[in-house]
Image (cartoon, rainbow, N blue to C red):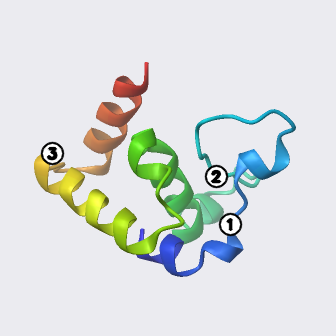
C-alpha cells in the first residue's frame, strides 16, 4: 500500500472517468490477463486497495490519516493470507 500512497499520481480513479459521482473510491484497472502483469506490484496494489472498506479507501488523499486507519484496520483483523483478506473484505461489501 505504500507504493500506492507514495505514487498516487500513477493511478487513475474510476470516479475521475465516470460521469456520475459515486461515493466509493475505486481504482481503474488496466485490462490484461497476462500472468506476469497479474503478479506485478502495481496490479496487486490496485486489487488490495479496491478490497479495502470504503471508509478507509476514501481517505487515500490524506496520507497520514490513510496509513493510520489502514494500520488500525490490519491490527484489529489479522489476516494470515491474501486469500483470507480478499474473502473477508469482499464478503463485507455485500
Quick check: 35 above or below 26?
A: below
What percent of the width, then of the height, locates residue 91?
36, 24
Q: Residue at x 59, y 79 (%)?
A: 7
Q: Earlier in the sequence, mark 2 or mark 1?
A: 1
Q: Residue at x 73, y 47 (%)?
A: 14
Residue 88 appears in the figure:
yes
Quick check: 66 above or below 20?
A: below
Mark 1 = which residue?
11
- Identify the secondary structure beneath mark 1: loop
- Identify the secondary structure beneath mark 2: loop
Other-residue count near label 3 (Cα within 10 Å), few / some / many at <14 / 14–19 / ≥20:
few
Residue 31 appears in the figure:
no
Other-residue count near label 1 (Cα within 10 Å), few / some / many at <14 / 14–19 / ≥20:
some
Mark 2 = which residue?
27
Q: Which mark is residue 77?
A: 3
Q: CA distance from mark 1 to mark 3?
A: 27 Å
Other-residue count near label 2 (Cα within 10 Å), few / some / many at <14 / 14–19 / ≥20:
some
**Residue 4 or residue 39, whichever sits in front:** 4
Quick check: 7 above or below 59?
A: below
Marks 1 and 2: in contact by CB < 8 Å?
yes
The answer to whether residue 13 is left or right of residue 67 is right
Q: Residue at x 50, y 50 (%)?
A: 58
What percent of the width, then of the height, locates residue 36?
62, 65
- Identify the secondary structure beneath mark 3: loop
Q: CA distance from mark 2 to mark 1?
A: 7 Å
Q: Earlier in the sequence, mark 2 or mark 3?
A: 2
What percent of the width, then of the height, locates residue 11?
68, 66
Amino acid at each position: 500500500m505504500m507504493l500506492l500512497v507514495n505514487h498516487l499520481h500513477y493511478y487513475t480513479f474510476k470516479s475521475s472517468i465516470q460521469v456520475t459521482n459515486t461515493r466509493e473510491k475505486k481504482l481503474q484497472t488496466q485490462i490484461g490477463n497476462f500472468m506476469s502483469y497479474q503478479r506485478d506490484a502495481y496490479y496487486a496494489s490496485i486489487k488490495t486497495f479496491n478490497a479495502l472498506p470504503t471508509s478507509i479507501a476514501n481517505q487515500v488523499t490524506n496520507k497520514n490519516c490513510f496509513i493510520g486507519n489502514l494500520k488500525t484496520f490490519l491490527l484489529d483483523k489479522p489476516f494470515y493470507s491474501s486469500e483470507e483478506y480478499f474473502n473477508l473484505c469482499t464478503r463485507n461489501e455485500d
